[in-house]
Image: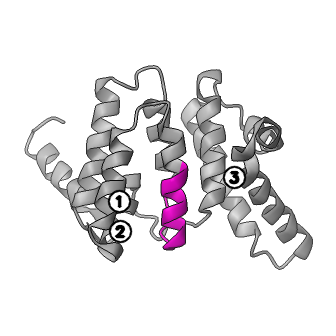
Amino acid sequence: MSVRDRRQAFVDSLYARERGTRSKNPRYAGECRQALARMRRMFSGARQQADAFEYVFPHDPPRSEQEVWLLVAGLFALNPQPPRSRKGRRTLGASMGELKARTGATADRRFTQLLARDRDALPHHLRQTIRLLASHDIPVDHHQLLDDLIVLLGDDYRGDHAHQIRLYWAREYHVPLKNGRADSQATDNDESESGDQK
């Protein structure tokens, strides 16, 4: 199984835990709630983080990505909402844009801080951001978040790819969503069709 397939299966398993909390089987629903609670507590310390290993390592994360996978498991447990649309992926910037539409300019400072954080400070700020989105019932696309954080928290976190991810976040924050798709995606498709390269 390729690394991309393993990432997909891992995040799918997180969403399956969320669905399981609504199961008609009380025992299974309880197990899923317990799993999410254990993943939520992983931010409390090393012992609590170890309790979350069983939900991550069976999916065989590459060694260079395992810390990011653990982080995403914890972030998911803070805001375990399924995506509202299955049409394409959306970045964390789009979720923050939805927050801005609801709360006004107060989201601007939070989002600017998020983009400005370096690799060491980003996980802490992400926890605060995900909690804020959860408090407003705004879901996060954890498939996309995992892919983005593998770059933003990786060895090349100051490189061009990381810069492009931040630009996509900013674009989706500032460009309203239409029918579950960002206008930026439509613009990119128009440019591709006209022969422009990203």
Q: Looking at the picture, tell me which residue is in the foreground, 104 or 168.
A: 104
Judging by the rendered image, the residue that carries numbered circle 1 is 94
Judging by the rendered image, the residue that carries numbered circle 2 is 98
* Image point (72%, 37%), residue name: 59
Give x and y (percent) for residue 40.
Answer: 71, 54
Locate the C terminus by quadrant: top left
Tell whether 10 sits left or right of 109. Answer: right
Judging by the rendered image, the residue that carries numbered circle 3 is 13
- Residue at mark 2 to residue at mark 1: CA–CA distance: 6 Å
| Element class at badge 1 | helix
Residue 106: name its quadrant. bottom left
* Image point (31%, 41%), residue name: 166
Q: Looking at the picture, tell me which residue is in the foreground, 124 or 28.
A: 124
Give x and y (percent) for residue 151.
Answer: 44, 31
Circle nearer the N terminus (3, 2): 3
- Mark 2 burial class by Cα count in 10 Å: few <14, some 14-19, many 20+: many
